[in-house]
Image (tube, rainbow, N blue to C red):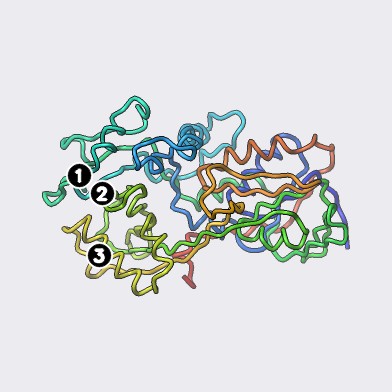
């Protein structure tokens, strides 16, 4: 068995691991990424691709720690997408699905929220659209609500994974491996192809997979899972729509969150999240589909979905344990000797996670780079996989 050393090894091939590999290699580290399955096949490709600025966290009419942490993210991602960032990855090859993201209601909103949306506190982050400015879909005579344009954008996550993977090759390995923890502070990664890698530092960026690795390494850290039951609607009649649906009934969270994606047979796939996905964890899949149909009928009574294909997708959001089980406001990165454990919390916070992890790393050791012969395996949207 051949053995090689490197500055750092990253376990986990989602957006967190791929982003960190890109940053580390650009700063002169001998770095590798190890992924057991296909790149992006966990939370990354199951996300809705929203790069948002936190307005959906202000539906109670006030700014929050979460909304302020995330406020600068659309601008930072747009800098990457234009290739203008000097420190973050070059994402010019990533497909931008929409420059516009909307927040709309099925009727009126609370006076507190409408006043807040018009306040100086979030000036430039929310724009109230007049009737003549509405997207075509909202000009139907049956629509009676309000529409706001947000500064958020939506990206195609498969193209994000492909772009980051292309920049990281040939330092990416996809396949089975064993983490040899004979010395927990200096673990060795043994690959299926017979190679053995001893990193000076190990980064755990495996999302839900971090739980098993934390236990194996005996680290004093907990992971929490917050489940979702997302809904996918496919139809040739669906328009491209990127929006949060809110109402007085939905309180301080979007009732529905909708993103649109190209699907098979010339169809559009609407990917539904929001409160529907959170509350849907307690429903059977048929009941969740029935609820989705009812919710869509409330917001879009003119939309004919009789022949649409509905399916569900259960996923877990993996995060650092919070004690109260609530969503963290920030990315998480903590060092335990030579091991760093991290979760981005949300796709849009990947750049902030990169900042945190890079601050924890020691200096590059002038070690020779490690290369793998086989090209990594890359995933697709989970609802487009053959076994979905």
Residue 44: x and y in percent read 53, 54
Identify the element where label 2 is drawn: helix
Q: Which residue is mark 3?
A: 294
| Mark 2 in CB contact with mark 1 (< 8 angstroms) | yes
Callout 2 crowding tier (Cα within 10 Å): few <14, some 14–19, many ≥20? some
Above or below — where is 162 with respect to 304?
A: above
**Along the polypeptide, which appears first: circle 3 or circle 2?**
2
Horizontal side, residue 360 vs residue 40: left or right: right
Residue 230: x and y in percent read 41, 62
Residue at 54 percent of width and 53 percent of height: 324
Residue 302, quarter of the rendered image: bottom left
Residue at 14 percent of width and 49 percent of height: 140
Above or below — where is 380 with respect to 68?
A: below
| Mark 3 in CB contact with mark 2 (< 8 angstroms) | no
Q: CA distance from mark 2 to mark 1?
A: 8 Å
Callout 1 crowding tier (Cα within 10 Å): few <14, some 14–19, many ≥20? some
Identify the element where label 1 is drawn: loop
Most foreground residue, 32 or 361:
361
Q: Which residue is mark 1?
A: 108
Identify the element where label 3 is drawn: helix
- For the N terminus, the image quarter is bottom right
Q: Which residue is mark 2?
A: 248
Above or below — where is 282 with respect to 149?
A: below
| Mark 3 in CB contact with mark 1 (< 8 angstroms) | no
Residue at 42 percent of width and 69 percent of height: 282
Q: CA distance from mark 3 to mark 2?
A: 17 Å
Residue 375: x and y in percent read 66, 57
**Along the polypeptide, which appears first: circle 3 or circle 1?**
1
């Amino acid at each position: 068995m051949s053995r090689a050393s490197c500055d750092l090894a990253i376990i986990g091939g989602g957006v967190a691991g791929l982003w960190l590999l890109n940053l580390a290699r650009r700063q002169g580290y001998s770095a590798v990424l190890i992924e057991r399955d296909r790149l992006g096949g966990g939370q990354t490709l199951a996300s809705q691709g929203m790069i948002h600025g936190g307005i959906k966290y202000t539906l109670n009419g006030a700014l929050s720690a979460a909304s302020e942490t995330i406020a600068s993210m659309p601008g930072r991602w747009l800098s990457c997408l234009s290739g203008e960032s000097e420190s973050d990855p070059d994402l010019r090859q990533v497909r931008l699905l929409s420059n516009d993201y909307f927040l709309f209601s099925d009727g009126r909103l609370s006076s507190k929220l409408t006043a807040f949306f018009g306040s100086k506190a979030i000036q430039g982050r929310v724009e109230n659209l007049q009737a003549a400015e509405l997207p075509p879909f909202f000009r139907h005579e049956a629509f009676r609500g309000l529409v706001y344009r947000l500064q958020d954008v939506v990206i195609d996550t498969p193209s994000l994974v492909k772009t980051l993977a292309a920049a990281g090759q040939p330092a990416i390995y996809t396949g089975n491996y064993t983490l040899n923890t004979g010395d927990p502070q200096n673990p060795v990664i043994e690959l299926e192809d017979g190679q053995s890698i001893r990193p000076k530092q190990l980064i755990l960026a495996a999302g839900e997979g971090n739980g098993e690795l934390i236990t194996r390494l005996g680290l004093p850290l907990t992971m929490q899972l917050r489940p979702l039951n997302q809904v996918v609607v496919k139809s040739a009649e669906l328009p491209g729509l990127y929006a949060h649906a809110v109402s007085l009934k939905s309180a301080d969270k979007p009732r529905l969150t909708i993103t649109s994606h190209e699907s098979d047979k010339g169809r559009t796939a609407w990917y539904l999240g929001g409160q529907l996905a959170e509350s849907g964890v307690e429903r059977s899949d048929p009941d969740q589909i029935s609820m989705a149909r009812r919710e869509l009928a409330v917001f879009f009574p003119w939309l004919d979905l009789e022949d649409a294909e509905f399916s569900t997708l259960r996923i877990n959001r993996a995060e650092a344990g919070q004690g109260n089980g609530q969503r963290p406001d920030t990315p998480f990165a903590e060092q335990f000797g030579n091991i760093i454990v991290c979760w981005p919390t949300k796709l849009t916070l990947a750049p902030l996670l990169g900042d945190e992890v890079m601050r924890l790393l020691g200096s590059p050791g002038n070690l020779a780079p490690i290369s793998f012969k086989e090209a990594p395996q890359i995933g697709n949207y989970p609802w487009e996989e053959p076994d979905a």
